[in-house]
Amino acid sequence: MAKTGLSTLIGNVGNILEIGTPGTGTDPTKAEITAWINEAQRDIARKVPWQCLKDLITCYNPSIAAVSVADMAGLVTDFYKFCYATLNTDGAGTDDKAMQLVNPEVAAMATTNSLIGTADSPIIWLSGTNINWLPATTGGAGTGKLKFYYIKEPTALSGDSDTTTLPEEFEDALVYYAAAMGRAQEEEWQQYGAFMQQYAAILQDIVNNYTRHLHFK
């Protein structure tokens, strides 16, 4: 099923709010509804588990040598949240090891605890603008050693034919969030609450469906 264009999403919001086709003279306007839909995209990307956001998963695969730290500058512009990471110490073959995300305090114990950050159980942690890991990679500069998967910021919608970069099952949630904001602007708090409950229920249903799938894999 194809994703729905922005103009149709805006029209669906207009139908819920019973204002007809949103434009420059409606209340709320088309521009306001567009802003709310984009706000909803960001809210979903922040709140929903990364496993539910398959269309936003991005791999940062920097060229690194014999190091144990990499600058996040290559992904900082659209980085939203961490998903998972793999380590292939020398970059040879396909023996990627899943990494355990730890906090800096646990990572600091690796200097005195040989069981932390081993070849079979590598660790990764974030500090400031750096990605850190153990054990260190080896050899000359090359990709395929550290693969850092993260959720990127959803692309803002602006043109009528633009479609969300979220998975399409979130489209109804975008509509109800924008409708809720429209009622909040009018201080109609009962309808605002009802629409936000519908928004939350849609998100929960999607999360439940993904969780059920993961349990049966």
Image (cartoon, rainbow, N blue to C red):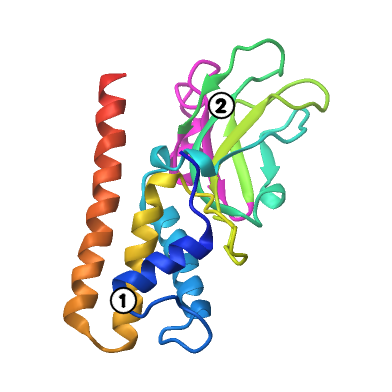
Percent across and percent down for residue 70 are 69, 41
The answer to whether one can see residue 178 in this image is: no
First along the sequence among labels 1 and 2: 1
Quadrant in the rendering for residue 14:
bottom left
Residues 10 and 20: in front is: 20
Q: Does the magenta-highlighted stretch encompass residue 108?
A: yes
Kindly state the secondary structure of the residue where label 2 is placed.
Answer: strand
| x 42%, y 64%: residue | 40
Quadrant in the rendering for residue 37:
bottom left
Q: Which residue is mark 2?
A: 86
Q: Which residue is mark 1?
A: 17
Q: Are marks 1 and 2 in contact (CB under 8 Å)?
A: no
- How crowded pointer 1 is (Cα within 10 Å; few <14, some 14-19, many 20+) is rated as some
Depth check, mark 1 against mark 2: the one in front is 1
- How crowded pointer 2 is (Cα within 10 Å; few <14, some 14-19, many 20+) is rated as many
Q: Which residues are magenta?
A: 101-129
Residue lying at the far front of the rendered structure: 20
The C terminus appears in which quarter of the rendering?
top left
Three-letter amino acid code at the position of disc 2:
Thr
